[in-house]
Amino acid sequence: MTRALTVVTNSQLTCFRRCQREHYYSYILGYRTHEDSEALRFGTLWHVGLEQWWLGRGLEAALEAGTRGAIDAYEAARVRVLLRGYDARWGHEAHVVVGVEREFYAPLTNPETGEASPTYRLGGKLDVLLQDRFVEHKTTSEDIGLGSIYWRRLTLDPQVSTYYAGARSLGHEVHGCIYDVVRKPAQRPRKAVPALDAEGERIVVNGAGDRVLTKDNKRWRVSPDAAKGYVLSTREETPEEYEARMAEEIAERPDHYYQRGEVVRLEEDEHEAALDAWHLVQSMDTGRRLGAFPRNPEACLRYGRVCQFLDVCTRVTTLEDPARFHRVSNVHPELEQA
């Protein structure tokens, strides 16, 4: 019986490049934390919504799908406003869609010999497959203006090259990648919005929390006075107000939030990416064989987020802590056949 090839994904290779110890915990042992980061959760919601949009099922279907797993009404509002803006920004463009969320498996080839690995194969999922190109969706908090570091870095991104190979494995010879990037709004719901009465007037209260009248006692005071201890009564911004504020912001600066760029790979680019992937997998194999998984302290904090395994590496806790970690049987949950 032929042994199934081990699947290696771009996410896995990225993790290995970042920190071999993190890769060991995540992809060899299969541990995950119970908590999903906001960035990962939002990215998932965004992909689910865009899947419906690109399938041609309409904006309302995209809104319903994209907000279904939101953690609260504010997160749902962010997804809705971005999807509506996306539809307004790109809805007029005509594309012939061949497939959406198309899973692929391609040979991991030694670029020096042309031979495929007898042990490993590449796996992934194309967000959108067009007739002669594919679309890759990304969400980010970085500057996505044309000419920014974000776009310059794409010239080195191996994922695009891997997905060229993935498209060919599905029988499609593609000639370009449309990198479809959305910048997440930095604005958060306001915690202190002035409270208004039924007439729309601001409410000023004293230290006891009682509403304050003007000096002549004829109307309610609407301005604070720190010396007298008079402060504005406030409340949290509602999800509806937050959504309206975000919609106005995005409508004023659509290019700040939505960008697309064509990423082309020359033959030499694909060769270099294949060489990178081949040697990374050989290093992964060597580490597994020797039981050596070096740590990378520079990766403990990235983009303001602490690595999920930092407490394990620093011996604050262990992987066996059921309150923090669990093991998964499939380390590639995005793939059905992995």
Image: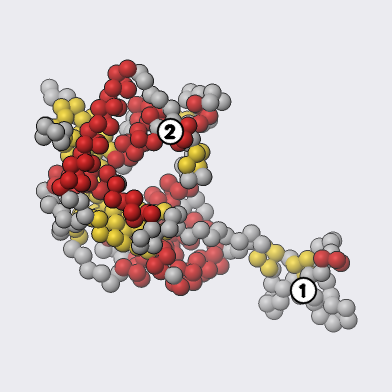
| Label 1: element kind | loop
Is 245 located above or below residue 279 in the figure? below
Identify which amino acid the numbered label 1 is placed on. Ser
Q: How is colour applied across the structure in the image? A: secondary structure
Residue 333, quarter of picture:
top left
- Assign the N terminus to one quadrant of the image: top left
Identify which amino acid the numbered label 2 is placed on. Arg
Q: Nearer the viewer, residue 324 or 143?
A: 143
Cβ atoms under marks 1 and 2 closer than 8 Å:
no
Q: Relative to 179, is 197 on the left or the right?
A: right
| Among numbered discs 1 and 2, the one appearing first in the sequence | 2
Instruction: Identify the residue at image location x=88%, y=78%.
Output: 215
Mark 2, other Cα within 10 Å: few <14 / some 14–19 / many ≥20: some
Q: Relative to 188, is 5 on the left or the right?
A: left
Instruction: Identify the residue at image location x=13%, y=51%.
Output: 172
What separation in Å lies between label 1 and label 2 (alpha carbons)?
52 Å
| Label 2: element kind | strand
Residue mark closest to the camera, 1 vs 2: 1
Q: Which residue is mark 1?
A: 223
Q: Is residue 334 visible?
A: yes
Coordinates of residue 40 in the picture (x, y in percent): 42, 46
Residue at the extreme right: 216
Instruction: Identify the residue at image location x=49%, y=56%.
Output: 75
Q: Which residue is mark 2?
A: 32
